[in-house]
Amino acid sequence: MLQIDHISKAFGERQVLRDLSFTVSSGEVVGLLGANGAGKTTLMRIVTRLLEPDGGQVLFDGHPLSQADLQSIGYMPEERGLYRRMRAGEQALYFARMKGMGREAAEEAVHAWFHRLEMDDWWRRPAGKLSKGMQQRLQFVVTVAHNPRLVILDEPFSGLDADGAAMMGREVTRLKAQGVAILLSTHNLPAAGELCDKTIKL
């Protein structure tokens, strides 16, 4: 589904990515491993068209990644991209609609995810009033509610306690079983070893 084809990226004289190639297939979890500054987030931003590569290309279903393809991608950045004053439920609905879902379908999907992740009581709480772990769960819902075919998770276990991390692992495994392609970066090596079908060292 996703093909990283000889991608290179530099910032000034600092070469962050050099001639990187790999694939992520449907129903496969691929982990990005590397120290801070190794280029994991840079690559994810290239895949989501937030950055342009200096060389190489990103292919989606065999064609160059286009803006329209982003409707089929869910991206959870390490830095939480939530509106702090907007209520959790309204926020999840807003982002689902931004990804092209109709109101009825968005409400059904978001309510189902809130119930699944034991978030029903958070619906009316502003995101800024949620703990870091609660915000991470909300951001996960924002990432997956529109049923993306490719999910990109940048440090998905950040801010989660043991129960939250276990929940995240279960949901990643469930998405994989549904045929979703998953690209994730993590410093949690045990989780990477358990979840990932293959890892890419940057």
Image (cartoon, rainbow, N blue to C red):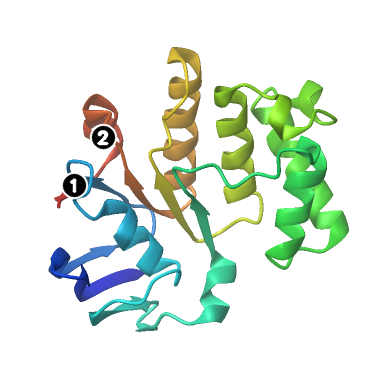
- The N terminus: image quadrant: bottom left
For this view, does 80 lie left or right of residue 114? Answer: left
Q: Amino acid at mark 2?
A: Ala
Q: Residue 90's x, y, as percent? A: 82, 44
For this view, does 88 lie left or right of residue 137? Answer: right
- The answer to whether marks 2 and 1 mark residues whose Cβ atoms lie closer than 8 Å is yes
Determine the residue positioned at 29% across, 76% down.
Answer: 53
As measured in the structure, the alpha-carbon distance from the residue carrying label 2 to the one carrying label 1 is 8 Å
Q: Amino acid at mark 1?
A: Thr
Q: Which mark is residue 57?
A: none
Closer to the camera in the image, 154 or 196: 154
Determine the residue positioned at 50% across, 35% down.
Answer: 171
Residue with the most extreme bottom position: 63
Is 75 situated above or below 63? above
Q: Which residue is mark 2?
A: 192
Residue 192 found in image quarter:
top left
Residue 8 found in image quarter:
bottom left
Determine the residue positioned at 68% across, 64% down.
Answer: 99
For the residue labelled by badge 1, is the local secondary structure a helix, a strand or a loop?
A: strand
Q: Which residue is mark 1?
A: 199
Residue with the most extreme top position: 162
For this view, does 60 lie left or right of residue 16? Answer: right
Determine the residue positioned at 77% across, 54% down.
Answer: 94
All told, the count of numbered labels is: 2
Is 91 situated above or below 25? above
Residue 80 found in image quarter:
top right
For this view, does 195 lie left or right of residue 8? Answer: right
Q: Residue 162's x, y, as percent? A: 43, 14
Residue with the most extreme front position: 12
Sequence-first tag of 2 and 1: 2
Is 117 situated above or below 56? above
Closer to the camera in the image, 15 or 135: 15
